[in-house]
Image (tube, rainbow, N blue to C red):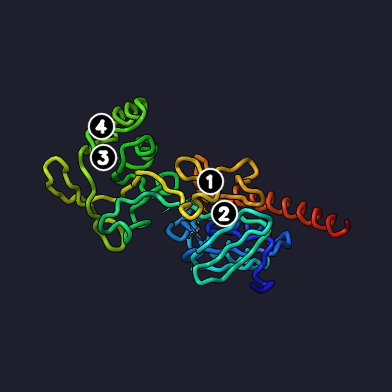
Amino acid sequence: MTLNNHYSAIVIGAGPAGLTAGIYLSRARVKTLILNEGTAGGQMILTHEIANYPGVDNISGYQLSNIMKNQAKKFGCDIKANIIIGTLNLEGDIKEVILDDGTKYTADAVILSPGGRSRTLGVPGENELKGKGISYCATCDGDFFTDKEIFVVGGGNSALEEAVSLTKYASKVTIVHQFDHFQAFEFAIEEARSHPKINFMMESAITAFHGTEKIEGVEITDLKTNTKQNYPIDGVFIFIGYVANTEFLEGKIELNKWKEIVVDADMKTSINGVYAAGDSIVKRYRQVTTAVADGTIAALAASKYLHELNQKNKLIQHV
Ligand SMILES: Cc1cc2nc3c(=O)[nH]c(=O)nc-3n(C[C@H](O)[C@H](O)[C@H](O)COP(=O)(O)OP(=O)(O)OC[C@H]3O[C@@H](n4cnc5c(N)ncnc54)[C@H](O)[C@@H]3O)c2cc1C
């Protein structure tokens, strides 16, 4: 390990939470490295258009992520993308991050911001049409479907509540659910059932998406008879759960039963000097704005920790 591989702070994950942490830390003259598996930018780069990020009008997720990345780099933050973390040692005063190619980085503080992913149906056409008519976020994309007909997939509270919220925009919402009953609170079921714009296709599943530039239709399989039928549609919202990208943290840090990182109000985790931010932490609302807010708090708290650590080390040197 060369001295250059030691940073005051290492941020894991370059989505909006991690990039914001990088901006704040670097601007505070904290030597910072952001490590990202895959292309930096996080879920923003999957987002065709972000219309609800304050201060910027109709920007693509890709553009917004580039602005954040350049801002972090401008303040001196190092960003390494397309890496894979092999080993992570978070206990102790010096934290170690070892990549699968053997490169070892060390840091005095770590911010974990690996984000998360919506559960997908995993059927043909879904990957290609994500952000082109297939969405996993009503708050983000509902407005793009004003006066259009849409399908909502799922049968839990999120699916039913989001289906009702989408009726503000869509002319018709059809809930497609694999079972003959919902797994949701009675009031959520009642609200959806009594809504004049909501229809139901029970015991049915979307088994393929059709379209090239944007979604044009779906194949729906009737699970009772196993017959398939194609339907033209303007949009599909999928609400079948959310997964935090915390597999690599299991056994290393406190996670809740949904594998989300447990933090306090300062974004501090169960380990001293380790903070977390963004979609991977225990929280209810997952948006770019909330990720950016968490990243800010984590960076400020980590800066304070690093300052106190420095003071402590100076005192020890004096003794
Ligand atoms: C299709 C879509 C549309 C959306 N539209 C909007 C919108 O319009 N407005 C809005 O506010 N929100 C929107 N969201 C939600 C928003 O993008 C997220 O809430 C936000 O990106 C979360 O930020 P994050 O930094 O916590 O995590 P992420 O954006 O998920 O970023 C995490 C980063 O960490 C990296 N990573 C993961 N695991 C590791 C690891 N082990 N090692 C290193 N790096 C790792 C990932 O590659 C990723 O780059 C949308 C989400 C999707 C999927």
Real-space Cα distance between discs 3 and 1? 30 Å
* Front-most of residues 186 and 218: 186
Callout 2 crowding tier (Cα within 10 Å): few <14, some 14–19, many ≥20:
many
Real-space Cα distance between discs 4 and 2? 38 Å
- For the C terminus, give its image quadrant: bottom right
| Residue at the spot of label 1 | 261
| Residue at the spot of label 4 | 181
Real-space Cα distance between discs 1 and 4? 32 Å
Real-space Cα distance between discs 2 and 1? 9 Å
Image coords of residue 92 (percent x, y): 66, 54
Callout 3 crowding tier (Cα within 10 Å): few <14, some 14–19, many ≥20:
many
Real-space Cα distance between discs 3 and 2? 35 Å
Above or below, 44 relative to 171: below
Sequence-wise, the earlier of marks 3 and 1 is 3
Sequence-wise, the earlier of marks 1 and 4 is 4
Q: Is residue 162 left or right of residue 309?
A: left
Image coords of residue 70 (percent x, y): 60, 67
What label sits on residue 112 in the rendered view? 2
Residue 215 seen in the figure: yes
Real-space Cα distance between discs 4 and 3? 8 Å
Q: Secondary structure at mark 4?
A: loop
* Front-most of residues 300 and 4: 4
Q: Amino acid at mark 3?
A: His
Q: Residue at x 55, y 65 (%)?
A: 98
Q: Is residue 115 left or right of residue 156?
A: right
Of the two numbered discs 4 and 2 in the rendering, the one whose residue sits closer to the viewer: 2
Q: Residue at x 66, y 56 (%)?
A: 109
Q: Amino acid at mark 4?
A: His
